[in-house]
Image (cartoon, rainbow, N blue to C red):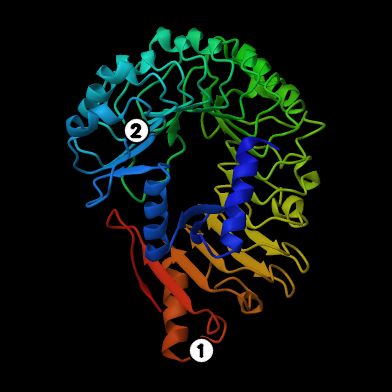
Amino acid sequence: MTKEEVAEGYLNELINRSLVQVAEMRRDGRVATYRIHDLWREIIVLKSGEQNIVTLAGEQNRAWPEKVRRLSINNHWECTQQSKRFTRLHSLLMFNATDSLSKFSILASSNDGLRLLTVLDLRGALLETFPNEVLKLLQLRYLSLRGTKVKIIPKSIGKLQNLETLDLKQTYVTELPDDILKLQRLRHILLFHYIEYPFPSVRFKRYRGFKAPTKIGSLSSLQKLRSIETNHDNGTILLGEVGKLTQLRKLHIESLRNEDGRVLCSSLEKLSNLRSLLVRATGEDEIIDLDSLSSPPQLLRMLCLEGGLHKVPHWIPSLHSLVRVILRWSKLRDVDPLESLQDLPNLVQLQLLQTHEGEELCFKACGFQRLVRLYLGGLKGLRWVKVEAGSMPHLEELFIRKCELVEELPSGIEHLTNLKYLQLGDMSDRLISSLNRDLERGNNWKIAHIPNVWIGDSKLGYWEGNYL
């Protein structure tokens, strides 16, 4: 087990003991965010202060230890008054701290430059260039500049030989220097930028990744690599290098060209530890060709393919660990995607967006036995959806958007006895009129068992609707 997996196990044990509460679940069934009771928090803060585990700047009436080891700065705080206490500082976290960059600069310029610092989180700080002070932190293991406006990572980042995590999410960095290859302890490279579009627009290219060094295969400790652009001169070589990263747990590939599919398949066969895979084509009409993959990663839990498909890859039904499957812009013709997916024993979430161009989808009896969340979107040729008795017995959430169903809801929806939420967005006027007539006549027995039914549209540029 990796250190990250051991840590997650400890956290789950605290949840089982009700010492930590689950705030939000991930779509793949894992826990996303946590919280604790306010009284329990007070106890933790008190004990943390007594044992010098964490010092919270901004907490009123809190006694400060002589040598602060881990400092969390929230909102306003004058660090100059306490600077003499930071000679042993190991971790510095800043949350919503005003003028966080200047505070960090003051700390870094004193106390021998924070030479023992191993964790630095400057997320959301108002900075546009990489802070030079960071390059002096030779013990640094974790660095986050998430949400800043940094554009360039200097070559001298190669000095940070102990760095394990580099978090550059939502920055403007588009390329990493070759000197990043000197950081042989790197475990996580998180670098992508989410492209904002006016809601509720659904666009193909929503993320921009980064151009990775060609020899990235030398970073043998990497577990997460998100997201690398491959539509360039060295893209084919780069995809071949990915196969050397045998410790990878998460991999996101951006702008895959059709002719590079075989190279990617060859690399994927070597990634036996992979849990999460996203592959996005260069455009929504570009075909993703992964059919030559003969031995897929058997531990894969999440699979997302965005781009054209001639057919559903033949190897998907063999991935019994899959919890979440997303197929977008597949535009399958004369192929029913449900046949390849319905027998996956652990599938919890399925999203189909512009995946199928046929007129009918049929969820057969005994199919999708563990599915909890189903999203059908942009299936403009779809006219009928049929749900046979015994299909999707545990389904709780059903989203149908921009589908041209005829005058009725999915046939057999009454069989989904555990359905708690039904959302219909941008549906045909005929279907909405038919549904309203049934409601007026009291003929709503098909959906009477569903606690929440929402109907809306985005004609005004935003979602507007009503609960029935």
Amino acid on which disc 1 is placed? Asn
Q: Tell me if 29 is positioned left or right of 167 in this view.
A: right
What residue does disc 1 label? 443
Residue in the image at 41% along x and 32% along y: 169
**Closer-to-camera residue (211/225):** 225
Q: Could you tell me which quadrant the N terminus lies in?
A: top right
Q: Give the mark count.
A: 2
Q: Position of residue 337 (x, y in %)?
A: 69, 50
460 to the left or right of 366: left
Residue 236: tell me if it is visible.
no
Viewer-side residue, 200 vs 24: 24
Asked if residue 38 is positioned above or below residue 101 in the image, the reply reads: below
Where residue 162 appears, as percent x and y from the top left, is 52, 19
Q: Quadrant of residue 373?
A: bottom right
Which of the two discs, 1 and 2, labels the residue nearer the N terminus?
Answer: 2
Q: Is residue 282 left or right of residue 200?
A: right
Within 10 angstroms of label 2, few (less than 14), some, or many (20 or more) residues?
few
Residue 55 vertical position relative to residue 119 in the rendered view, above or below: below
Residue located 81% across and 45% down the image: 318
Relative horizontal placement of residue 163, taking residue 462 as reference (left or right): right
Residue 409: image quadrant is bottom right
The x and y percentages for residue 398 are 55, 65
**Residue at image coords 44%, 60%:** 36
Q: Is residue 78 visible?
A: yes
Looking at the rendered image, the quarter that the C terminus falls into is bottom left
SS class, disc 1: loop
Q: Amino acid at mark 2?
A: Lys
The residue that appears at 61% across and 17% down in the rendered structure is 219
Residue 40: x %, y % from top left: 42, 62
Residue receiving disc 2: 67
Residue 149, numbered label:
none
Query: Callout 1: 10 Å neighbours few (<14), some, many (20+)?
Result: few
